[in-house]
Amino acid sequence: MSTLKEKMVVLGSGGHACVLLDIAETCSEFEVVGCVAQERKSTEFSVPFLGDLSNLPQLLADGVRRAFVAIGDNKNRQQVTARVLALGFDLVNLISPQAAVSRRAYLGNGIAIMPGVVVNAGARLEDGCILNSGAIVEHDCRIGPYSHVAPAAALAGNVEIEEGAFLAVGVRVLPGIRIGSWTTVGAGAVVIRDLPSHVTAVGVPARILRRNDFRS
């Protein structure tokens, strides 16, 4: 006996969206009707490209209630998510079956968890965050909304990542560290002290390279 799947639209058209489509296809509860984006960037889609975001109201009227925002850029993802929620869509989480996520972790909405990710007990993942391939989030960490932990980054216990922060490939963060909102940590950096908001930090140990002009 077949189970009726919930219809879902994916927002995004690049490589990040292709990865999330792969994951969505393994989630038996969803039927992806297609992707929408301002422009089509990838030719690797396994579902129809449905045009730009102006088509979202019609999709909603046609009974597509679920959505996932598959946009890698943190600020853009935050803005598009606000638009999707204002229209009345419900956000889903896309979690690879090759990820290990503790049942004692808290998950918000619109979260991407890629293959090889480990999320341990007591971790808190806020809305719209991304845990990319092979990332490790240890016990009692907090991953703020619209942040991005890149492939092979590792967070020891009780780390706090604030809204919109980006930890690049291979970053290491020591226990109890706080990384401020909209801060970027460069690839391979080792963070041994708290970092304030709106900076870029690089190196081993991580040091502040510059202040970011961007403000949320």
Image: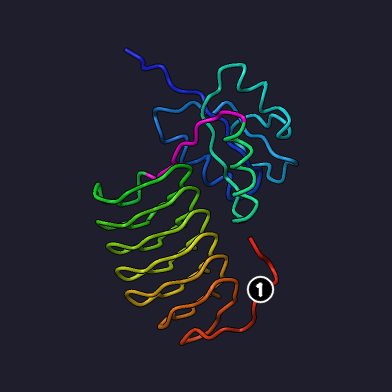
- Return the residue nearer the eye: 204 or 123: 123
Colour basis? rainbow
- Return the residue nearer the eye: 175 or 149: 175
How many discs appear?
1
Q: Residues within 10 Å of mark 1 (few under 14, many from 20)?
A: few
Q: Position of residue 189 (x, y in %)?
A: 49, 79
59 lies above or below 174: above
Q: Label 1 sits on what residue type? A: Asn
78 lies above or below 172: above
Question: What kind of element bears circle 1?
Answer: loop
* Magenta-colored stretch includes residue 88: yes
Task: Determine whether, in the image, residue 128 is placed left or right of residue 154.
Answer: right
Task: Determine whether, in the image, residue 24 is placed left or right of residue 140.
Answer: right
- Return the residue nearer the eye: 131 or 49: 131
Residue at 36% across, 17% down: 3
* Magenta-colored stretch includes residue 109: no
Q: Position of residue 67 (x, y in %)?
A: 54, 33
> Which residue is situated farthest in the top direction here?
1
**Picture quarter containing residue 38?**
top right
43 lies above or below 176: above
Residue annotated with mark 1: 212
Q: Which residues are magenta?
A: 87-96
Q: Position of residue 14 (x, y in %)?
A: 65, 48
Task: Determine whether, in the image, residue 102 is placed left or right of residue 180.
Answer: left
Residue at 49% across, 63% down: 150
196 lies above or below 88: below
Q: Quadrant of the N terminus?
A: top left
Residue at 61% across, 16% down: 62
Q: Position of residue 8 (x, y in %)?
A: 53, 28
Task: Determine whether, in the image, residue 56 is placed left or right of residue 189.
Answer: right
Q: Quadrant of the C terminus?
A: bottom right
